Image: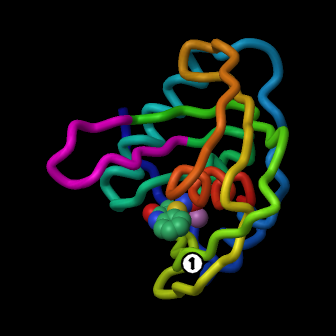
Amino acid sequence: MAIRRILTVDNAADLAVLKQISTPVEGAVTDELRALMDDMLETMYDAPGIGLAAVQVGEPKRVIVMDLAREGEAPAPRFFVNPEILERSEELFSYEEGCLSVPEVFDAVERPARVRLTYLDYDGNRVEEEAEGLYSVCIQHEMDH
Ligand code: GNR
Ligand code: NI
């Protein structure tokens, strides 16, 4: 595993990459893709952050890692390949968001409070579930990348 550099918007070359629309992963979840997810998780823990999109380490693919465990809790890494939102609640939720690619900026972002999503996990299995609270905020933030 390796810590990768997180691209930031204050660097013109990084910004051009961060603006790219990430493309779906084709085919199965391979060992190569798992190696990218492992690097992303290590990079996210090092930052530290609670989520990271692949484009933030210069790979504009639809791959996300996340860990919402609090300090003192056991690590709870989550991996998302080709996530799609299936349904969103009418009810909104506002949360003070930051982004590792946008240093020193924090602001309230209003989003659907709950989303139903589907994705492939680390093992390539299809998952469908509902997200609420910080999980809902974070998955929507990462998918916006
Ligand atoms: O570490 C992060 N914290 C955070 C806080 C509130 C809402 C979203 C986030 S995601 C952010 C890491 C990041 O930039 N992911 O793309
Ligand atoms: Ni971000």
Residue at image position (48%, 45%) is 66
**Who's the residue at 52% across and 41% down the image?**
65
Image check: 128 left or right of 137? right
Q: Nearer the viewer, residue 69 or 60?
A: 69
User: Looking at the rendering, in which quadrant would you find the N terminus?
Assistant: top left
Residue 112 sits above or below residue 94 on the image: above
Q: Is residue 33 above or below residue 101?
A: above
Q: Residue 15: percent from the left, percent from the top? A: 71, 73
**Is residue 100 among what the camera can see?**
no
Front in this rendered view, residue 91 or 122: 91
Taking the magenta stretch, the answer to whether it contains residue 67 is: yes
Answer with left or right where residue 5 lies relative to residue 89: left
Q: Where, by quadrant of the figure, is residue 117 drawn?
A: top right
- At mark 1, the secondary structure is strand
Asked if residue 49 can be seen in this view, the reply is: yes
| Residue 118 location (% of width, % of height) | 74, 30
Determine crowd level at label 1: few under 14, some 14-19, many 20+ residues with C-alpha closer than 10 A. few
- Which residue is the site of mark 1? 102
Q: Which region shows up in magenta? A: 65-76
Q: Quadrant of residue 81?
A: top right
Q: Decide whether the magenta segment is chiefly helix, strand or loop.
A: loop
Q: Quadrant of ligand 2?
A: bottom right
> At which x and y percent is residue 67?
41, 45
Say if 54 sits above or below 77 in the image.
below
Q: Which of 12/124 is in front?
A: 124
